[in-house]
Image (cartoon, coloured by chain):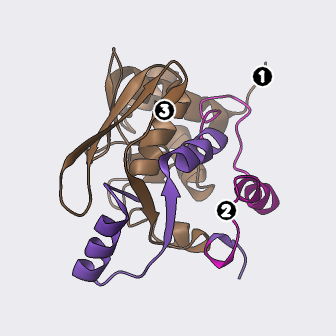
Chain colours: A brown, B purple
Amino acid sequence: MSIDFDTAVRLALYEEFVRTSSPPTAERLPTQMQRPADEVRGALERLAQGKAIVLQPESREVLMANPLCAVPTPFRVRTLERSLFGSCVWDGLGIMAMLGSDSVLDTSCACCGEAMTIQHRGGAILPAGVIHFAIPAKRWWENIVFT
Amino acid sequence: MLLFRAEEHIENWRRQWNQPRGATLTIDQAWRLANAWYPNKMDPDWRRATLDETEALLANLGLTGPFWNLRN
């Protein structure tokens, strides 16, 4: 199957992110893909414009390749092989859905701080608690970091 | 999107931080939403859903009404 360059960049980014628990840097990705840095940077910017990923405001390194987040958050998903962070509880569940393997989401109650876990075993979710969406759906991308 | 132990914790948090009431989902609802939204993100043929597709996805999960409206 032939894929376009932006898709190749997206796949390389996600594969490395899931494998190492960190996104490749904008310096490493071109080396990995054996393509010029400005081409890869351009692809990352287009992916961000298309809301496939979120870049950091100044460095333009990857902040989110949703549902994955590049920086530690209170939403950590653990599998046998790795730990990954989501930006919110929904993204934590998104990581579990994307990976498909047994996993545990470690988090805490946003009100009182009590530790909570949501487990995914054999395709089923063992729930705990309730989720509150504060921002109406049409405004999620006005400030995705806050959302 | 935040997780709370129970409804009363949402209300306590809202009062403490002066936040408006949004929408509350059970974990099962959010799990179905995550499964509809994210599983193919690492596939070559992934693309961002259109507005119509996103509306249909939300409606299929029973997420309708002003909070889930995507249009102005």
Task: Tell me which amino acid carries mark 3.
Answer: Ile
Can residue A35 be seen by looking at this rendering?
no
Point out the image quarter for the C terminus of chain A: bottom left
- The range drawn in magenta is B38-67
| Subunit ID for the residue under disc 3 | A
The count of marks equals: 3
Between the C-alphas of marks 2 and 1, the distance is 37 Å
User: Residue B68 shows which numbered tag?
Assistant: none
Disc 1 crowd, CA 10 A, few/some/many (<14, 14-19, 20+):
few
Residue drawn at x 51%, y 25% as measured from the top left: A99
Between the C-alphas of marks 1 and 3, the distance is 36 Å
Residue drawn at x 35%, y 29% as measured from the top left: A104
Task: Tell me which amino acid carries mark 1.
Answer: Ser
Point out the image quarter for the N terminus of chain A: top right
The residue carrying mark 3 is: A125
Q: Is residue B8 left or right of residue B33?
A: left
Residue A122 rendering spot, x and y as whole percentages: 51, 18
The residue carrying mark 2 is: B63
Which dot, 1 or 3, sits closer to the camera? 3
Disc 3 crowd, CA 10 A, few/some/many (<14, 14-19, 20+):
some
A68 magenta-colored: no
Residue B69 rendering spot, x and y as whole percentages: 69, 73
Residue A107 rendering spot, x and y as whole percentages: 27, 44
| Subunit ID for the residue under disc 2 | B
